[in-house]
Image (cartoon, helix red, strand yellow):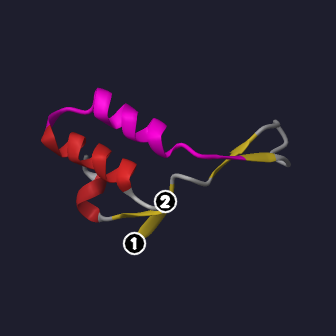
Amino acid sequence: MKRINFERIEIFVDIDKTRCSVENYKKDFANIIYQLGRGIEAHALAFKVSSINSIYPLVSDSRTL
């Protein structure tokens, strides 16, 4: 099972990929799912992502959303 830490996502800031910035995208990602997702499953996933403490386990039924 893969895990995603939405509070600590590393983004490269140069073309050589030698420097990176650590960003917190938890609320941004949850808002995108909430606004663009269709159905109750997408809204439930958005609330789940926004309420997690740090690491979100990506399980098989979450990948299909």
Residue type, mark 2 in image: Ile
* Disc 2: which residue: 4
> In the image, is residue 45 part of the stretch drawn in magenta?
no
Q: Residue at x 19, y 32 (%)?
A: 38
Q: Secondary structure at mark 2?
A: strand
Magenta residues (range): 22-39
Assign the N terminus to one quadrant of the image: bottom left
Q: Position of residue 56 (x, y in %)?
A: 42, 61
Q: Residue at x 39, y 58 (%)?
A: 52
Query: Which residue extends farthest left?
Result: 40
Residue contact between numbered discs 2 and 1, judged by CB atoms under 8 Å: no
Query: In the image, is residue 9 above or below residue 13?
Result: below
Q: Residues within 10 Å of mark 1 (few under 14, many from 20)?
A: few
Residue type, mark 1 in image: Met
Left or right, 18 with reference to 29:
right
Q: In front: 1, or 31?
A: 31
Q: Residue at x 78, y 38 (%)?
A: 13
Q: Position of residue 12 (x, y in %)?
A: 74, 43
Frontmost of labels 2 and 1 is 2
* Disc 1: which residue: 1
Left or right, 17 with reference to 28:
right
